[in-house]
Amino acid sequence: MKKTSINRISRLFVVLGLALFLVSPVFAQKNRADISEKYKWNLQDIYANDEAWNQAKEEVAAQFDKILEFKGTLTSSSENLLACLDFTSELMKEAYKLFSYASMKSDEDTRISKNLSMQQELEQMFTDYSAKAAYIEPEILSVDWSVIENFMKEEPKLQVYSMSLGNLFRRKAHTLSEPEEKILAQAGLISGNAANIYNLFSNAEMPYPTVTLSDGSTVTLDKSGYSKYRAVPNRSDRELVFHEFWSAFEKFKGSYGEQLYGNVKSDIFYAKARGYNSSLERALDANNIPVDVYHSLIDNVNKNLGTFHRYLKLKKRMMGLDTLKYSDLYAPAVKGVDLKYNYDEAKALLLEAVKPLGDEYVNVVSKALNERWIDVYPTPGKRSGAYSSGNAYDVHPYILLNYNDQYDDVSTLAHEMGHTMHSYFSNKTQPFPKADYSIFVAEVASTFNEALLNDMMLKKIKDNDTRLSLLMSYLDNFKGTLFRQTQFAEYELLIHEKAEQGIPLTGDLLTELYGEILKKYYGADEGVCLIDNLVVYEWAYIPHFYYNYYVYQYSTSFTASTALAEKVLNKEKGAKEKYMAFLSAGGSDYPINVLKTAGVDMTTSEPFEKAMAAMNRIMDEIEKILDSKK
């Protein structure tokens, strides 16, 4: 997942992004001090040490009052407008660096309160600053768009803000008066509390269970432990893991329910305050995405649940099961094939996989792998999952991993490297005000790299069992990225709609609603997959529900990247060049337009249909191999 932290230009309230918990399995962890430096990211590329960070923070804070000097001058001349926007832009660039350093330092060990306090200090600072700067948008919007257009003609340097200014006027109806904007800015101090509490409790303080497996080993089922042991070959062990893990969440359903309800109420508050018809409309309007794109995704997936059920039945056949249970879904579908690659082997595989994108792309990937852009291994207290952060505009992107020598970890490396390359080329090509690309396109580059990796591996490996394992792994991407994320998107929409109707979201109701959607997607009533009663508490485990309609973009991005990857791999004329231009576009245009230029139109069903066709081709190949083995 791309990790973001701050909205652009005059929307100066700082929002800390949440890392995607693509939770990796955990083995016997080393202490951070015992890991070679070459496997740890080098935050000194941002600031030499905490003292240097503190000095930079104080220097930024000392500039805050200068923003008041521009008040009342913004629409009097192009020169004044440029001066204000340049000031805020430079300030935000430094803020990105401050937040990047503090958040990544905290992610190294979430148990260290000092690092967390660094983030909290910045939140307070920039909340105060955004209140001071709350006049900017209303003041600019006090004149007609024609005035701003003339300013940009008079002063060419204003062109770097053309997207921000155009987007501001596009959303003019939802911008409030200066006093109201100040109130919303101050509300930022509390609006993220639900997500912060969820993150802290679920990662650091929740009492996760300990179980004894059939081999006599005793393991702790925290998030990383659950991710590992839900995939063990022994079915009884998997069922034990699921029962104990979800039983733990059942005990805290009330607390998790209040956390999620608090987050949903925050979304609704901002939607109402800004005059939107719904929280969905507000969330999508930020990037000018029609709400029909969201609804069409859910409709298309529901119409194609038969294809998803075909995948589930195929997994059941490959595993030799009479009944497929939800607890079977993460276990290897092919017995005796356990693809393992150490990190150095993973680096070599990735470099080979991305060769279709050309020498420049490969060379930058090599720099990232070898110049300490990546924090590789899990350590006690380290944030779980994986993400890429490209927020330090003048430095380079960073990647957090929890690498565990599994093929899934190779795929995660490819995924996060896609984000990193997207950030690298956008930052390199675009000026800072236009460098930050939309979340709507963020997952295209990551899943595109996964497609390249899968294609390379299938060309390399001829053994039928290994091919079956890889093909099923690719199908698992369709399951996890397209169907599962759309399932989440449907649930997220439903709980917001319930709350918008005035219905309180209790832990019991959240569980009931999640269970209904889960059973529909997995064909429980048709006997496709058995859903255990405790699995319905999965909603409490998913951090994505705190991202304000983020997850649907995994699905839309996956369909887009599937189409784009096929064009590149088939060596379609100009496809590679268009894709590289897409990576370099940043936020220079609206995401729908950027993808159209790259070769996919997300306002149509064509990308989804191509993804379904690709999924069915993979299942055809699997069935062909299985039939040949009879």
Image: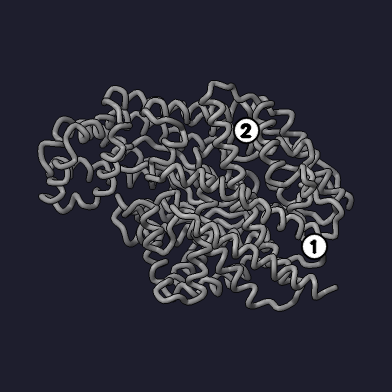
Q: Is residue 280 visible?
A: yes
Q: Nearer the viewer, residue 436 or 207?
A: 436
Query: Type of residue at label 1?
Result: Met
Distance between the alpha carbons at the discs numbered 1 and 2: 38 Å
Comparing labels 1 and 2, the label whose residue is closer to the camera: 1
Secondary structure of the residue carrying tag 1 is: helix
Residue at 22% x, 45% y: name it: 86
Secondary structure, mark 2, is: helix
Query: Mark 2 sits on what residue?
Result: 201
Per the image, the residue denoted by label 1 is 318
Tell me: 575 left or right of 223: left
Q: Is residue 1 left or right of residue 250?
A: left
Residue 373 in view, yes or no: no
Provide residue 283's location: percent of width, then percent of height: 44, 38
Of 598 and 375, the residue lying toward us: 598
For label 2, count other residues whose C-alpha is less than 10 Å away and answer few (under 14), some (14-19) or many (20+). Answer: few
